[in-house]
Amino acid sequence: MQVQALCPARPDWHGARAGWCLSEIGIVTRLSDKIAGAWRKSLDFLAGRRSTGNPRTKEEELFIRAHDLVRAGEFEEAAAALADATAIAPDLVAALETQGELYDMLGQPEKAMSLYEAGRKLKRKLRPGAPDRFFVLRRAGRSTAEIAAYTTVIQSVKQRVLPLIARGNAFLVEGRPAPALADYEAALKVKPGLSDVLALKGEALLMMGQLERAAAAFDSACAVQPRNTDFLSGRAIARMALDRLQDADADWRLQLDLLPKERASARACVALRLADYEQALPELERALEKEPCDPYWQLYRLAARHRLGHPTMPGNMSRHDSWPGPLFELYVEPPSAEAVLARADNGDRAAEALFQLGALALPADPDEARRRFGEVVEKAPPSMIEHAAARHELARLGA
């Protein structure tokens, strides 16, 4: 599971206020009322827009255009601009919700309700990132609206680290590590040594494949907060990607020791990265008590039970028509590997399928398992649970 959280900042369309949900760890939590008030007053999408050095996407341009049109009182034109944004990015929930608000203001409640419902349906389909990862990476969905909003704040309020961090986080959620890195480095110039920002910088570098620099950034963050579970998670992934598996395992084991018992799903993910199925299985059972229909916890429980030689009980699984539904079929009446892989419509899903094929091949066909796990390591990003688990399986197979 690629396990792509800052709450979205959504400017009020009447220009009266802008809400931030910066209720996260470290520096991102320490926002004074005075600064927040100044930001709310300064958030005007017509004021002082200049180039920030980060090229805007077409969706961001359309968001800014929509705000300009709202300020001019041209609500229908603004809704049309947002419709163009959703045509480019159909999963842009904020655009649907804001169109709904505009049609409410235009006295068209039926159209507004249909847009609200479309937004709710999209939200239900979004899967958060892995719960053992940095809070920013647990967020699901796109951040186009936040990027546009924070850009305006940055232009209006100088020498403040929080809007830089917030926009960097939004870029990171969007899978745009280069502009995220630029914002984190700008924040560190204003206020050097912030451990949260050093770790976020490490996450951006990790996403960019700059592994040595990423590991160094995480080292700096962990020197300040050696028991921060998010920092340990990022550093473990960087170390593993650098073939320092022993060091990575030390970080994951410490993370596992530090995660509280109530965070069963996070603990399960760490144990799965270690391919420690004895430790993962009870955590997955507890995770399923809280989220009994979660398809990934069900799938990972199947894999853990299979690897431990327990009955897999596929008949007890909920039906899942969408992904990862096809992978449950492997535990019932296995289709051909080619048929399963053909249904994996992106690289992450292909890696998930390859890992399950490798796990199912053990213990009967270790050569096949070795081949499948090798493909996972080759194709999956190091941040995926399957990548780390495959590396550990290969180590046990002597590969």
Image: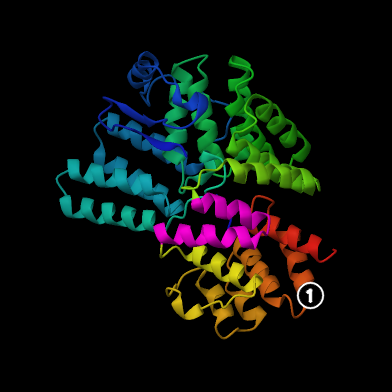
x and y percentages locating residue 189 in the rendered image: 63, 17
User: Viewer-proximal residue, 317 or 326?
Assistant: 317
Q: Is residue 199 left or right of residue 20?
A: right
Give the vertical position of 95 relative to 296 (above or below). above
Give the vertical position of 365 relative to 385 (above or below). below
x and y percentages locating residue 170 in the rendered image: 50, 37
| Residue located farthest toward the bottom when viewing the structure as drawn | 333
- Residue 3 appears in the picture as rendered: no
- Secondary structure, magenta segment, majority class: helix
Q: Which residues are magenta?
A: 264-291
Q: Is residue 142 left or right of residue 39?
A: right
Image quadrant in which you'd find residue 137: top right
- Residue 120 appears in the picture as rendered: yes
Q: Is residue 273 left or right of residue 40?
A: right
User: Viewer-proximal residue, 64 or 381?
Assistant: 381
Amino acid type, residue under disc 1 in the picture = Pro
Give the vertical position of 321 relative to 106 (above or below). below
Q: Is residue 274 left or right of residue 18?
A: right
User: Viewer-proximal residue, 185 or 57?
Assistant: 185
Mark 1 falls on what kind of element? helix
Give the vertical position of 310 relative to 219 (above or below). below
Q: Is residue 238 magenta?
A: no
The quarter of the image holding the C terminus is: bottom right
x and y percentages locating residue 133 in the rendered image: 57, 44
> What residue is drawn where x is 45% and y is 77%?
316
Which residue is the site of mark 1?
Answer: 366
x and y percentages locating residue 106 in the rendered image: 17, 43
| Residue located farthest toward the right when viewing the structure as drawn | 398
User: Viewer-proximal residue, 117 or 334?
Assistant: 334
